[in-house]
Amino acid sequence: MPALPDLLFYGFAGLTLLFGFLCVANPLSRNPVTSAMFLVLTICSLAGLFVLLNAFFLAAVQVLVYAGAVMVLFLFVIMLLDLKEEERRKLNKVALGAGTVAVAVIAGILIRAVTSVKPVADKLVEGTTKPLGKILFTQYLLPFEILSLLLLVAMVGVILLSKKELK
Amino acid sequence: MSLIPGLHHYLIVSALLFSLGLLGVLARRNLLVIYMGLELMLNAANLALVAFSRFNANLNGQVMVFFIITVAAAEVAVGLALIVALYRKRQSAHVEDLTSLKL
């Protein structure tokens, strides 16, 4: 009888991949709103995987920032643009052949990369707020401050970009 | 490989999720959905980093994921503003209509 966290891994991993597939290649709908909704579900099941990996703080941040802020932004823009549905295209033979070769090469690289790694330690770390905060404000203080500057720059840039007349 | 999930299992999920994101970027024709494919790829990288952090007992990977999430939020804001500006000029967000750089 397998333990509950192991079963949960398979559940969340299957859900993540299923929702991810429905996000990019939904056979029933080409509507961007549907894609966005499935992206939210993908991100939530990824947060579940983060919890299984003991990264509790990141799971919370994932739901708050990605599923909350980023996806609301996406949905706002989708509503704002009022896009028409994209039509299905026919595949041509050259593209299909080139795609198969590319997929084989990428799969080879990924399989090699995955099979060549070995986990080092078996000690457990817990990604709770306290140890993460400690490391963030000591070892990573400078990148953290630069990141806040980056967010400010992005905000100013977005305001400038969305002005009616660009000068 | 055993059935009990270890580093390899998480990395395989991450690789598959990355491939799904890449498929979305290459196959879809709507700029916003292409952007969602990019987000999927970023999330796949995050999953790999968190898995490495867990199985190497090292918190640095999780700090890196925290930074990636922040930068991704900034990137989404700028990218969506660019898409909106483009839509104002061209009345379209489909990549077939944006071929002025094509040779």
Image (cartoon, coloured by chain):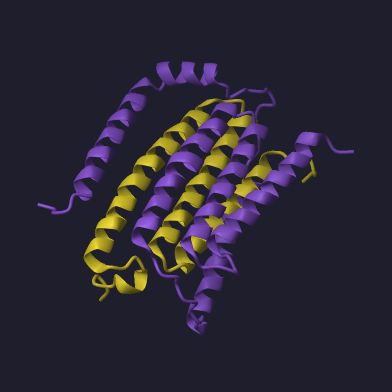
Tell me what hue chain B is rendered in.
yellow
Residue in view at x 45 percent, y 60 percent: B33
- Where residue A75 appears, as percent x and y from the top left, is 43, 52
> Is residue A108 in view from this perspective?
no
Residue in view at x 24 percent, y 62 percent: B88
- Where residue B103 appears, as percent x and y from the top left, is 25, 76
Q: Nearer the viewer, residue A167 or A107?
A: A167
In the image, residue A12 above or below residue B35: above
The N terminus of chain A lies in which quarter of the figure?
Answer: top right
Residue in view at x 64 percent, y 28 percent: A54
Q: Residue furthest right?
A: A1
Q: Which chain is purple?
A: A
- Where residue B78 appears, as percent x and y from the top left, is 30, 47
Tell me the quarter of the picture where residue B90 sits. Answer: bottom left
Q: Classify residue B45 as left or right of residue A50.
A: left
In the image, residue A38 above or below residue B73: below
Q: Classify residue B60 as left or right of residue B78.
A: right
Q: Nearer the viewer, residue A106 or A84?
A: A84
> Is residue B68 in view from this perspective?
yes
Number of labels in the image equals: 0
Residue in view at x 35 percent, y 69 percent: B95
In the image, residue A150 above or below residue A137: below
- Where residue A55 appears, as percent x and y from the top left, is 59, 29
Q: Nearer the viewer, residue B5 or A7?
A: A7
Tell me the quarter of the picture where residue B54 sits. Answer: top right
Q: Residue furthest left?
A: A167
